[in-house]
């Protein structure tokens, strides 16, 4: 794990060109287990709302620094003020610690939208990739169940959504795309083991949002998958389950790519087009008023 973190947690500036934004500030948000670090990116153009962003990394790796390039680019593409969450990671902090931190930050943002994005009328989107997509999917259900004002949309980028199915290799992509390149099946198993611990329940909806009793009433979703990803079929099945529950859903599969598509645009030739499509979906959610929000 130490080697994986050393490789994955390098600052974005060490591996990619960093895009300028209008302002970057760091602060902490009171959480259930102590302060939660956040990094706030204000875009060059006036922001149309706020995006709470949850980084990937298998719940084990990923930091505010390693995701700095992506969150800057996202802020400018929408444009929106992006609040990146430095949530607690496994194995030091098991499921659902990351979601607890995300919930604390989301509620903090709700009380400060006028300052974070003046004139946006409190519009917020929750977004995350990989493990962050898992966190985002769980978070919006928590918000629904608590009666908290929901985000305008949830953006889930190649999310893991069912630990039971993953362990059983229940979907074709678990076998077809689990060896060779990208996110390996064995890596995913290790991440789940770190996140759940020896006593964690893989069937808990706090780990596996696919297994929630109901997905009805959740915010509109944009779900992105990639062709050669062990998580491809999980993400697409979750999008279908959301749609079956009456949630407005837009899905997009990027063919010819591996898990991690949104990384450095110099490495992934479709990283920028994919991010632009995500930004379009977020912008639409932030600018459409009333319910339901269509993305």
Image (cartoon, rainbow, N blue to C red):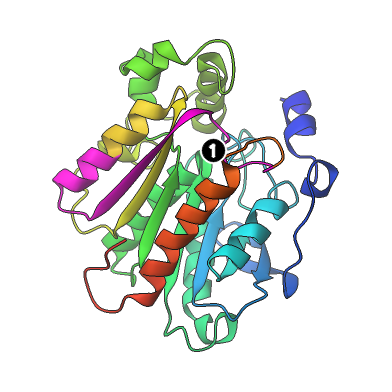
Give the quarter of the image for residue 145: bottom left
Give the quarter of the image for residue 240: top left
Q: Which residue lies under the disc numbered 1?
A: 94
Q: Please give the range of residues in magenta.
A: 239-265
16 with respect to 174 (left or right): right
Q: Which residue lies furthest to the right in this view?
A: 14
Give the quarter of the image for residue 260: top right
Q: Does the magenta stretch include residue 252?
A: yes
90 with respect to 266 (left or right): left
Considering only vertical position in the picture, is 280 above or below 131?
Answer: below
For disc 1, the neighbor class at 10 Å (few under 14, some 14 to 19, many from 20) is some
Give percent across and percent down for residue 288.
Answer: 32, 75
Q: Name which residue lies at 44% across and 70% down.
A: 124
Q: Name which residue lies at 46% across and 76% down.
A: 110
Task: State the count of labels.
Answer: 1
Which SS class for mark 1? loop
Give percent across and percent down for residue 35.
Answer: 66, 63
Considering only vertical position in the picture, is 73 above or below 138?
Answer: below
């Amino acid at each position: 794990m130490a080697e994986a973190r050393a490789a994955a947690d390098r600052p974005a500036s060490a591996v990619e060109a960093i895009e300028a934004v209008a302002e970057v500030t760091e602060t902490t948000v009171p959480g259930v287990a102590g302060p939660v670090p956040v990094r706030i990116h204000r875009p060059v153009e006036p922001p149309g709302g706020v995006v709470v962003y949850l980084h990937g990394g298998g719940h084990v790796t990923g930091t505010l620094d390693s995701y700095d390039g992506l969150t800057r680019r996202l802020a400018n593409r929408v444009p929106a003020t992006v609040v990146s969450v430095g949530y607690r990671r496994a194995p030091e902090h098991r499921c659902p610690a990351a979601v607890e931190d995300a919930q604390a930050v989301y509620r903090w943002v709700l009380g400060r939208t006028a300052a974070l994005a003046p004139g946006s009328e409190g519009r917020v989107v929750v977004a995350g990739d990989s493990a962050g997509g898992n966190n985002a999917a769980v978070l919006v259900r928590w918000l629904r169940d608590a009666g908290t004002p929901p985000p305008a949309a949830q953006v889930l980028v190649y999310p893991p959504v069912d630990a039971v199915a993953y362990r059983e290799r229940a979907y074709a992509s678990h076998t077809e795309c689990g060896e060779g390149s990208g996110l390996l099946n064995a890596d995913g198993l290790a991440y789940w083991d770190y996140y759940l611990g020896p006593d964690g329940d893989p069937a808990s909806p706090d780990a596996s949002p696919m297994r929630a009793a109901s997905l009805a009433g959740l915010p509109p979703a944009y779900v992105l998958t990639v062709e050669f990803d062990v998580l491809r079929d999980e993400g697409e099945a979750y999008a279908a389950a959301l749609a079956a529950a009456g949630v407005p859903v837009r899905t997009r599969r990027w063919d010819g790519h591996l898990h991690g598509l949104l990384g450095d645009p110099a490495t992934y030739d479709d990283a920028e087009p994919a991010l632009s499509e995500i930004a379009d979906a977020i912008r639409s959610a932030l600018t459409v008023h009333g319910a339901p929000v269509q993305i």
